[in-house]
Amino acid sequence: MLTSYPDAWNTAIALALAMGSVKIPKDEFPPCGPEESGMFERSVGEPPHGQRSDWRCSIPSSGMGAHVRDFGTYYEVHIDRHDALRMPVRHFFLDSRTGKAVLAAGGAITALALALRERKKMGG
């Protein structure tokens, strides 16, 4: 049980760094949410996974960011390799599912265009 703030959010971030993500029941967390902590900024996550809100903070000296999703009865904390607050474009294309899909579609279209161009060169 996480019992004190400010260590609670730092501990949650450390656990997410070690484990990839962590779910923390609110009844095991001090009554200080991301908004009240002063550490996080309100954010937008990808299409809702059922969360009530999204919060982010930068992890100093790392280029990474922590993303908190509030699901009402628990928080889910995970780490983004590219901090959405400091590197939003890089985060979108390299960390988000939507951005990865855009890159994949762009790659497929480019490959198709190159194949058609090559086919045309060969007289086909």
Image: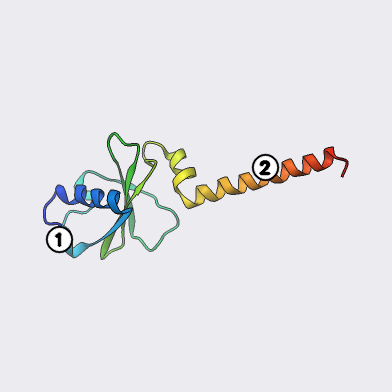
Dividing the picture into quadrants, the one containing residue 70 is bottom left
Q: Residue at x 55, y 51 (%)?
A: 101
Q: Residue at x 81, y 43 (%)?
A: 119
| Residue 57 badge | none
Quadrant placement of the C terminus: top right
Residue 111 is situated, as x and y percent measured from the top left of the image, at: 68, 44
Q: Residues within 10 Å of mark 2 (few under 14, many from 20)?
A: few
Q: Are marks 2 and 1 in contact (CB under 8 Å)?
A: no
SS assignment at label 2 = helix
Drawn side of residue 1 relative to residue 25, left or right: left
Q: Residue at x 51, y 47 (%)?
A: 99
Q: Is residue 30 above or below residue 103?
A: below
* Mark 2 vs 1, N-terminal side: 1
Q: Which residue is mark 1?
A: 1
Dividing the picture into quadrants, the one containing residue 115 is top right
Residue 96 is situated, as x and y percent measured from the top left of the image, at: 46, 49
Q: Residue furthest left?
A: 4
Distance, label 2 to label 1, CA atoms, is 51 Å
The kind of residue on which mark 1 rests is: Met
Q: Which residue is mark 2?
A: 110
Q: Residue at x 88, y 41 (%)?
A: 123
SS assignment at label 1 = loop
Quadrant placement of the N terminus: bottom left
Residue 120 is situated, as x and y percent measured from the top left of the image, at: 83, 41
The kind of residue on which mark 2 rests is: Thr
Residue 95 is situated, as x and y percent measured from the top left of the image, at: 44, 47
